[in-house]
Image (cartoon, rainbow, N blue to C red):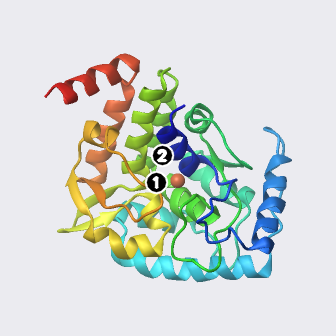
Amino acid sequence: MSAQLDKAVNTLAYGGRLAADHPGFTDTAYRARRAVLADVAARYRPGQPVPDAPYSDEEHELWRTCTLALAERHARGACSAYLDGVDALALPGDHVPQLREVTALLQPITGFSYEPVPGLVSPSDFYGALRDGRFMSTQYIRHHSVPSYTPEPDVIHEVIGHANQLAVPSFAAIYRAVGDAVQRVHTDAAVQFLSRVFWFTIEFGVVREGGGLKAYGAGILSSFGELDAFADADVRPFDVVAMGTQPYDITKYQPVLFAAESVDALEQELTGFLSTYDDEAFTRLTSRRFAS
Ligand SMILES: [Fe+2]
């Protein structure tokens, strides 16, 4: 597994380790909370009830703060399909929902369920679970000193970002298509390409709507700092090969984004690409791009 792929998978799938520049790195109380919540996830066994995470009053307060700040920005910056998902899912604003609560709300809409993960999961496991309608989610919450942004996926990102997306049938179809596609590839390079396409669409995708630019990516929609900044990015036309070969830095607001012309066009183009993606398609697509 390459370093870049490792970095991408860390961001997408878990948040167990703290880097030295993490806002909670020197906060021993925060690190202890992370350990408690990781233990809860570690007790989970597939097929068993998802154990509840014992959130503190401060963690519920942080959820309330972020929920309010995000909702205000979603009204201006989120695409209409995502806002439909917000209405359909109706997440609680007053407490951090347990993953079993998220599943109870989401499963009747698009069939997806949430399962806890304490740490690293392989890209095959993370993306492969999507095929079965299972979303592997962290449970810890970002550090209170930087509520506007997290460089790793916390429960705010997983639930406000991804679950609201997963409540939209068009987006849920893309997640399942990613899960199908990852079963067909066997090289790190082909998985990395898929990870980058996922990053620039499901995580940081934007769409043209109503004469402006709106966000549908979970990474933007779960970060009020990113929501304030995304309109200033270098916005490029939707191009799967460009996305699959575009490096990114997870520790900064994203300077490059790719805009779909509509959510319907996004679903059509992306599921079409994913339905035939395999090792051979990866080689064909990337050799053509680098040869031109
Ligand atoms: Fe994510």
Q: Which residue is mark 2?
A: 172
| Residue 15 image-quadrant placement | bottom right
Q: Is residue 192 left or right of residue 41?
A: left
Q: Is residue 94 left or right of residue 110?
A: right
Query: Which quadrant does the N terminus fall into?
Result: top right
Of 227 and 2, the residue lying toward us: 2
Left or right: 7 as drawn, with respect to 97: left
Q: CA distance from mark 2 to mark 1?
A: 6 Å
Labelled pair 2, 1 in contact (Cβ < 8 Å): yes
Measured as percent of width and height from the top left, residue 79 is found at 34, 65
The quadrant in which residue 288 appears is: top left
Query: Residue 166 in the image: x percent, y percent?
Result: 51, 52
Residue sitting at x 60%, y 47%: 13
Residue type (three-letter) at the residue carrying disc 2 = Ala
Decide: is 148 above or below 109.
below
Assign the C terminus to one quadrant of the image: top left
